[in-house]
C-alpha cells in the first residue's frame, strides 16, 4: 500500500496522478491541483518558482500521508509537488486520494493540502509582471 | 563544534549563502543558534522571529540541544502548495 509522494522538476502529469490512486475498491477519487494564479492583491504574476528543503519536505509529506491514513479510510494517496519554474496556469501541486466513499476523499484531500501548505518546507517566489520578484513568506512583508 | 547550517529562500538571500558553517559550543541549543545566526548575519534579525529551525528534518524547539552530527536548517515561513 505504498503512497506515491514525489517532488519533481517538470510538468505534473495529472493522468499519472490519477492512475497512482486508481483501485477497484474505491468508489471515490478526489484530485486537487494548486495552480499559478494570475492576480494576487491587485498585482499580476507572470510565474512562480518553487524551492524545497528536499529531504525534510519528503519526510514531512510522508508524515502527513501517515496521519491522513490514521484519520480516514484511504485506499490510495498521491502527492506530487513541482519545484523550479511554474508558468501561469500550470499546476504546482497535485493531491489525490481514493476512498470507498466520497466524504472521506473530500475531507482527507482538503486536510492534506491545508496541512502541506502549513508545514512542508517548500517556498515560492513570485515574479510579477512589473519585473519584481519576492519570496512569499506568510506573516511577513515583501522580502 | 562546527555545524553547517542550511538556509533557504529569503534567509539564503540575506545570508548570501545556502550554507553557513557556524562555530557553536558542544551543548548548544537551538536558542543559542538563533542568537549566533543574528550575530553572524545581522540582516537576518527581522526574519528571525518568523523562522523555524529544523534539526534532522524535524522542527525543533528553542531548548532542544543540537548534536555534533545534526543536520540543521533555517526554515522561513513556508509557502508551498
Image (cartoon, coloured by chain):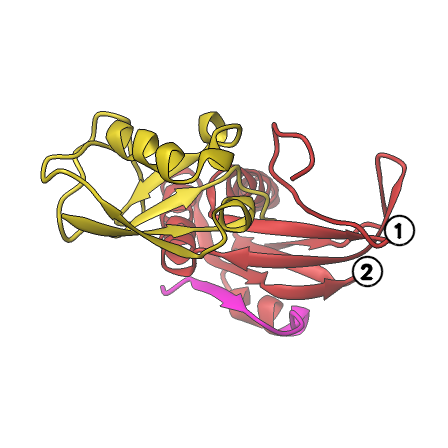
**Mark 1 packing: few (<14 Cα in 10 Å), some, or many (20+)?**
few
Using the image, name the chain to which the residue with label 2 belongs. A
Q: Nearer the viewer, residue B52 or B79?
A: B52
Q: Is residue A10 above or below residue A7?
A: below
- Tag nearer the camera, 1 or 2: 1
Residue A30, numbered label: none
Q: What residue lies at 13% left-to-right and 44% top-to-bottom?
A: B67
**Mark 2 packing: few (<14 Cα in 10 Å), some, or many (20+)?**
some
Q: Position of residue A88 (x, y in %)?
A: 81, 60
Q: Nearer the viewer, residue A73 or B58?
A: B58
**Is residue A7 magenta-colored?**
yes
Q: What residue lies at 86% left-to-right and 50% top-to-bottom?
A: A38
Q: Secondary structure at mark 2?
A: loop
Q: Nearer the viewer, residue B8 or A48?
A: B8
Q: What residue lies at 45% left-to-right and 50% top-to-bottom?
A: A74
**Is residue A112 magenta-colored?**
no
As drawn, the residue found furthest toward the left would be B26
**Residue bearing the label numbered 1:** A130
What color was chain B assigned in the picture? yellow
**Which image quarter: residue B25?**
top left
- Relative placement, left or right, of B44 versus A12 is left
Q: Position of residue A54 (x, y in %)?
A: 42, 60
Chain given the colour red:
A
Q: Which residues are magenta?
A: A1-15
- Relative placement, left or right, of A15 versus B68 is right
Classify the position of the N terminus of chain A by image quarter: bottom left
Q: Nearer the viewer, residue B11 or A78?
A: B11
Classify the position of the C terminus of chain A by image quarter: top right
Q: Position of residue B37 (x, y in %)?
A: 36, 37
**Residue bearing the label numbered 2:** A88
Q: Are marks 1 and 2 on the same chain?
A: yes
Q: Secondary structure at mark 1?
A: loop
Amino acid at each position: 500500500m505504498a503512497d506515491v509522494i514525489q517532488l519533481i522538476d517538470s510538468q505534473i502529469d495529472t493522468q499519472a496522478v490519477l492512475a497512482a490512486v486508481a483501485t477497484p475498491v474505491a468508489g471515490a477519487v478526489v484530485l486537487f491541483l494548486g495552480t499559478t494564479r494570475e492576480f494576487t492583491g491587485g498585482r499580476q504574476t507572470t510565474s512562480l518558482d518553487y524551492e524545497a528543503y528536499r529531504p525534510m519536505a519528503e519526510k514531512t509529506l510522508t508524515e502527513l500521508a501517515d496521519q491522513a491514513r490514521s484519520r480516514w479510510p484511504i485506499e490510495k494517496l498521491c502527492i506530487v509537488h513541482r519545484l523550479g519554474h511554474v508558468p501561469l496556469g500550470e499546476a504546482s501541486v497535485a493531491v489525490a486520494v481514493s476512498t470507498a466513499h466520497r466524504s472521506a476523499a473530500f475531507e482527507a484531500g482538503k486536510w492534506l493540502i491545508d496541512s502541506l501548505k502549513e508545514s512542508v518546507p517548500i517556498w515560492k517566489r513570485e515574479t510579477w509582471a512589473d519585473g519584481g520578484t519576492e519570496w512569499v513568506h506568510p506573516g511577513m512583508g515583501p522580502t | 563544534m562546527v555545524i553547517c547550517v542550511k538556509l533557504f529562500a529569503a534567509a539564503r538571500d540575506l545570508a548570501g549563502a545556502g550554507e553557513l558553517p557556524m562555530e557553536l559550543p558542544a551543548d548548544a541549543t537551538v536558542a543559542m543558534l538563533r542568537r549566533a545566526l543574528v550575530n553572524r548575519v545581522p540582516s537576518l534579525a527581522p526574519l528571525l522571529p518568523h523562522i523555524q529551525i529544523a534539526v534532522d528534518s524535524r522542527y525543533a524547539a528553542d531548548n532542544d540541544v543540537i548534536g555534533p552530527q545534526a543536520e540543521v536548517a533555517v526554515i522561513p515561513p513556508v509557502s508551498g502548495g
